[in-house]
Image (spheres, rainbow, N blue to C red):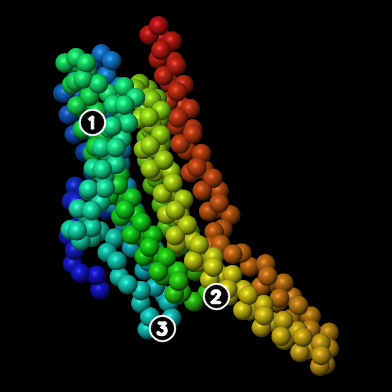
Amino acid sequence: MTPNHPTFWFLKLIIPGRFGWLATFFLIFLVLFGFYWMSGALTMPDSPQGVILFFIAILAYLPSAYAWIASRADQCRQQLMELLPSGETPEWVDFHRRSVRWQLLYLAGGLTMGSIHMMMLFWTDNLEFSSSLATRITVLVMLGSMLVWVVSTTVIGALFECAYAFRDIADRIEINLFKLEQLAPFAHIASVFMLALVGAQAAFSLMLIQGFTFVAFVPGWLGLFVPMFLLMALPIVPVRRSIIAAKAIELARVDKLITAERDGHNDPATLAPLLVYKREVAEVRELPFDVGSYARAAFYLLLPPLTWVGAALIENVVDSFVG
């Protein structure tokens, strides 16, 4: 059993209840919007309103999304426990908790990544202290950017802990080649990881409204895009490996039966079913995804580009009216 570690610090913001994660999203969004509005960041001239709106959206989204993911992960793990060999249990990982040392380590990692990003922004003149107004905007942007890096680094680290837990289960389960639907929770949790990080990537479209720069956009976007595929691969790759191994063992067994039958009686009535069975085993899919899962994954991947195009069109329409 995992020690009784403290709850993730960002999960302490989540309102209790079935839809507490959703209520928390709106609450954090309104609080941050009010803060930045009162500070003038959304009304000052030359302020990167799009970047500020991105900060508000992503800081409200990530903790809420992880709370939803953790509940789904608990459900998927419970379903997969039935596939473990009798008497075997994987190391238990609480998706809501981690040690103080772990949390401080990722906090330091987020501060380090945020500091590096800040230096890049200053070196490329995206941030400056040339006037009192520019200094005020710079301080507000630095505050939001550092918070985003800290929260996103910790949330992604927590997601990897989830993925490693499912990888551990995938390495231990018993595969039934003709009941691959039992492996659906692996596909479900991989889709959940993708959906969560795709939603975060979609928030980057807000930068296109005002304040977009290459240096401000790309590091954070890559920090979500690359982990998305790694998180999907961690639970899926071992499952695929187990399915391939089970198929190889079963095909070898059937080949021995076919060879024995040919060398012996060579009875078509006995040989035909073995050949049919061998073909059925060979055609068993090697991933726990069905057609619907592939369709959902393709749709999820299209969401960020669609939101970016939509934001760009909205900005052009607004500029045409203002102009």
Which residue is farthest bottom? 264
Image location (x, y in percent) of residue 15: 20, 48
The answer to whether residue 120 of the structure is visible from this angle is: yes
Residue at x-position 36% and y-position 56%: 160
Which marked residue is nearer to the observer: mark 1 or mark 2? 1
Residue at x-position 39% and y-position 73%: 81
Which marked residue is nearer to the observer: mark 1 or mark 3? 1
Badge 3 or badge 2: first in the primary sequence: 3
Q: Nearer the viewer, residue 150 or 263?
A: 150
Q: Amino acid at mark 1?
A: Met
Badge 1 or badge 3: first in the primary sequence: 3
Q: Which residue is mark 2?
A: 176
Residue at x-position 72% and y-position 86%: 257
Question: Horizontal placement of 60 versus 175: left or right?
Answer: left
Considering the image in quadrants, where does the C terminus appear?
top left
Q: Amino acid at mark 3?
A: Ser
Q: Which residue is mark 1?
A: 142
Label 2 packing within 10 angstroms: few (<14), some (14-19), many (20+): some
Task: Indicate the secondary structure of the residue bearing disc 3.
Answer: loop
Label 3 packing within 10 angstroms: few (<14), some (14-19), many (20+): few
* Label 1–label 2 contact, CB within 8 A: no
Which residue is farthest front? 123
Residue 86 tag number? 3
Residue at x-position 54% and y-position 65%: 240
